[in-house]
Amino acid sequence: MKTTPPERPRREQCWPLLGRDAELAEAGRVIDDPHHGGVLVTGHSGTGRSRLAQECWQRAGRRGHPGLRVTATAAARSVPLGALAPLLRRDPDGAPALDTDRASGRRRPVLLLDDAHHLDGASAHLLASWLRAGRIALVATTDAPGAAAPWPEPALHAVRLAALPQAVVGELLERVLDGAVERRTVRLLHETSGGRPRDLRELVDDAVRRRALVSEGPLWRLVGPLTATPRLHALVENRLRRLDPPHSAFLQRLAVCGRLALDSAERASAQALADEGWLRVVAEGPQQCAEPTGPLYPEVLRAGLPAQRIRRILRDQAARSRTLDPGPAGLLRSVCWRLEAADAVDPGELERAVVLARRAQDHAVTLRLARELAHVRPHPRTLLLLAEELYEGGHPREAERTVRRALDEATQDDDRLFAVVVHVQSLAFGLLRVDEALAVNSAARRAFAGHPDVAVLEANEAALWSLLGDVRRAERSLRKVPATPGAPASALVAVPRVYSLTESGRTGDAVRAARQARAHGRAEAGAEGVAHPAQLIGAEARALAESGALSAAEELARQGYDRAVDAGAGRAQTWLSEHLGWICYLGGRMGESRVWYSSVLAHAREVGLRSGEWVGLCGQALTAAVCGDVDRAELWWEQARSLRPGRWWRPEAALVSAWLAAATGRPSRGRDELVEAAGDASRRGLRTAESHLWCDAARLGAAREAVAPLAELAAGSDSALASARADLARALATGRAGQLERCAGRLSSLGAGLLAAEAWNAAATVHTGAGAAVSARAARERALALAGPGGARTPGLVPPAVRCGLTGRELDVALAAASGLSSEEIARRLSLALRTVVNHLQRICAKLEINDRSMLRTAIHRTPGEPAPG
């Protein structure tokens, strides 16, 4: 993927103030109320106190309040009235008074006072007198969140700033970087900055400068580490100097150890530091623990500690945890601390720590411990454990090398059997070598016939056929796997079973199966299995989406994605991105779908996950084709086809090919390909995919042929989306405006925006043909509102006036020309003479009252707000 040179956000530019609307409105009401003295803006360091106060002050000025501004400093604190000196004049009796020339106006002036906690006593006393007399309104800031103003009366209205939530950070990044930002990148920046706008800006500016944050295609993503800048170091160190020695020492221990169990004497201190934003107090069973609010403060604190001091802290805390924190979590932390301190750890204790980390579903820690265990005890079982973690973490090539080593060294059947499981999954799902994976699994089934755990190979077989898009064969293998909760085979087939149920049209059963498997996983406290639990969340989200619950599916998939990112489960992250891309595609939100598929492709290429790379390329090609971007679609599709193995069959491939044909003026060819693919899907038991394919064939003009198969598929499925597709085909076939409008309403309620938009547009076309201009205009406006600007450009969204004014062949030529094809290319693709294409284009321009073909794209794919051509 091409990486474009990033443009560094300029420091002198003011970042947008997002996520503070409520606070600004609240402050504005207080300032305009003559019975209030003003507002005191508080919040942890870096939350944007000064920026919010300045915005309040500027808005008051735009409402007619004269503006005054001063800043209190520690240096001026020793000088009486030093902070307010710029605003003062002397009365005849020598007393200081407010300079009326500076404070003139019909409304009371608003004074912006930054860092009010540095006010000297005389300034505070004089300011309080002005407030009591109502001579000014005050907008003040202080860095002491729980502190009152430095004067007792009158009290100001407190506006407390919290950290920005992740959603606001994502919106802010997209505004600043002028492009979509990968959700993983948003999450990492939010976690590292703690949601503090000042720290976020420092991190982004530095990451762009170092090219750790780059633009890849339509997506900004992190490709390098986030580090604290010198300015952030200085700011944090300045805050640290204000802490008393016990608090400072506790923060040093926390920065080195990451999470600490608290004894009774430490809880009050930890809570005080939590109130100042240094840490958070969390419950861990009956134990209370402290952990940093993000990696930024620990990085700065550790940077100032000598290596010997760090090792001493680690050793002391490991010794302390034996009595204070003897539980499983404490043991895991103790092992990690001793390893970091370069102390010896007993291999048995290390192996137990690996198991505990797996149960905690923290793949980053598990992988680190598994590497150490394989180093000190390079037995087949420990190598296999490492291979599993490498595979789940998204490192298929290294996993393949490690599992081959385990196979070479294994002498016991149990070790060899489970090594084959990881080997097959790594070959197929990681490296896309499915033929080799099938051969290895088949040979193992013969070799291990009669083994008590041979069912894991049947589970592997089911997973392979599910991957290859053959539900019938997958179900035959699934029936051979005993449903024993907690057994390795049951864990392995949990995700393939959900997918098979979903694709066979039993979406309700699929959702229930996913939830039961997740519940069993929790009850087993981390049952053994290759897949991270987030994989089951993704499978459930896919089932929900295919059932028609698109909004719930998207929310669940986002939660699963965040969980996978936090756990370092790279494979789960890739597939959840793919599910989110598909969910957005079903919803007709092509821009968001493209971003998710870009994330799939970028991450898969980064870690060498070939199956993810194929899915990302295919998703990119599909969204580009539906949006009429032929050049990009063909580029992505050519790359995807170069990766696809012979037995791999997925309906997305047929969708890409069909929509590419439609975008280039060949809807009949697209229809034929979709009908043929629907037959293949039926033979493979992919009833949900068959429903997709027949529906798209109906959208491209084969509505009459699609009515019967879609009705049969809907009758055999519990999916509301499959039923709505059948309704759409019937409505398109009958051509009745009322039926189309009812169908559009149902599709819209399910969240299928693009299908609903096409149904409204079809109704508008019927109204236009009947001369009902008002109804046609209303239906067309509904269609455009659902389609949105800059999204899909399908034949179903062609304006009614164009569709009614052109013949079928003219519309094909117009669509091809609008996609950017030359006359020669149109002639070749449509099997027409060049002169015939030219004549068609002349008639099309005349009918549409446009000057030349360059205006065709606007005429055929007009979006809300665009002027009519001509």
Image: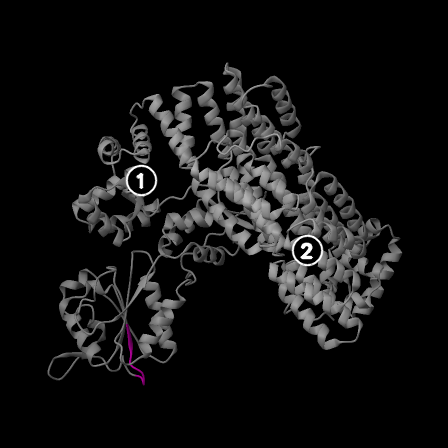
Residue 483, given in percent of the width and then of the height, sits at: 55, 33
Residue 789 can be seen, yes or no? no
Tell me which colouring the rendered structure shows.
one colour
Q: Residues within 10 Å of mark 2 (few under 14, many from 20)?
A: many
Q: Is residue 432 above or below residue 556?
A: above
Residue 590, given in percent of the width and then of the height, sits at: 62, 55
Question: Label 2, on which residue?
Answer: 723
Dot 1 falls on a residue whose secondary structure is loop
Instruction: Give amino acid for label 2.
Output: Ser
Magenta region includes residue 109: yes
Q: What residue is rendered at 36% in x and 52% in y?
A: 199
Q: Is residue 759 above or below residue 30?
A: above
Q: Quadrant of residue 337?
A: top left
Q: What residue is rendered at 60% in x and 21% in y?
A: 444
Question: Label 1, on which residue?
Answer: 258
Q: Residues within 10 Å of mark 1 (few under 14, many from 20)?
A: some
Count of residue discs: 2
Q: Main secondary structure of the magenta part?
A: loop
Instruction: Give amino acid for label 1.
Output: Gly
Q: Is residue 91 left or right of residue 526?
A: left
- Image: magenta residue range: 105-111
Residue 229 can be seen, yes or no? yes
Q: Nearer the viewer, residue 851 or 164?
A: 164
Q: Is residue 464 left or right of residue 418?
A: right
